[in-house]
Image: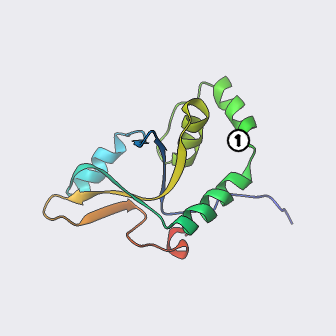
């Protein structure tokens, strides 16, 4: 049996906060999500409860040595990619600093003030974020 560590499979999102600003790349895939779900406006971020963030971030950070990964990313001229929010965030933090955040992300519906969370959901617990 292997004792290989791995990331948990999650329905959630990571982003970076630096100087009070959210740093999170925008991918053209999001235009399709918005069109298909009749969504509008800018992305809406909802941080998970503090304890949930701490548990998930600690789990993700325990999997690999980010100093070594960062060296490889620099060597291959890493560019941010869709569905790689954790890696994108760690690269951003290593390059420019900031604080890693975990939780939900989505947009408002065009027809109401309700929010469609493409990643995560409102008031989700640890159990709901992990698939």
Q: Can residue 37 be seen in this view?
A: no
Q: Quadrant of the N terminus?
A: bottom right
Q: Is residue 58 visible?
A: yes
Q: Residue at x 65, y 26 (%)?
A: 74
Q: Nearer the viewer, residue 1 or 89?
A: 89
Q: Quadrant of the C terminus?
A: bottom right
64 up-or-down from 73: above or below = below
- Horizontally, is 30 left or right of 126 in the view? left
Q: Which residue is drawn at 57% across and 38% down?
A: 93
Q: What residue sits right under mark 1 in the picture?
A: 66
Local crowd size for mark 1, using a 10 Å CA cut-off: few (<14), some (14–19), many (≥20): some
- Horizontally, is 33 left or right of 120 in the view? left
Quadrant of residue 51 within the rendered picture: bottom right
Q: Which residue is drawn at 53% across and 65% down?
A: 50
Q: How far across and how far down the image is residue 26, in percent?
A: 37, 40
Residue furthest out toward the right: 1
Q: How far across and how far down the image is residue 119, in percent?
A: 42, 60
115 up-or-down from 29: above or below = below
44 up-or-down from 68: above or below = below
Q: How many labels does the image show?
A: 1
- Horizontally, is 100 left or right of 46 in the view? right
Element type at mark 1: helix
């Amino acid at each position: 049996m292997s004792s290989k560590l791995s990331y948990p499979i999650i329905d959630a999102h990571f982003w970076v906060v630096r100087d009070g600003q959210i740093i999170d790349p925008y991918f053209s895939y999001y235009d399709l999500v918005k069109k298909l779900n009749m969504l509008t406006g800018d992305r809406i971020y909802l941080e998970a409860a503090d304890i949930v963030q701490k548990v998930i971030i600690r789990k993700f950070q325990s999997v690999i040595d980010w100093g070594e990964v960062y060296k490889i990313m620099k060597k291959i001229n890493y560019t941010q990619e869709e569905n790689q929010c954790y890696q994108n965030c760690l690269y951003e933090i290593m390059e420019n600093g900031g604080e890693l955040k975990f939780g939900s992300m989505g947009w408002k519906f065009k027809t109401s003030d309700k929010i469609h969370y493409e990643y995560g959901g409102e008031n989700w617990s640890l159990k709901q974020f992990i698939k």
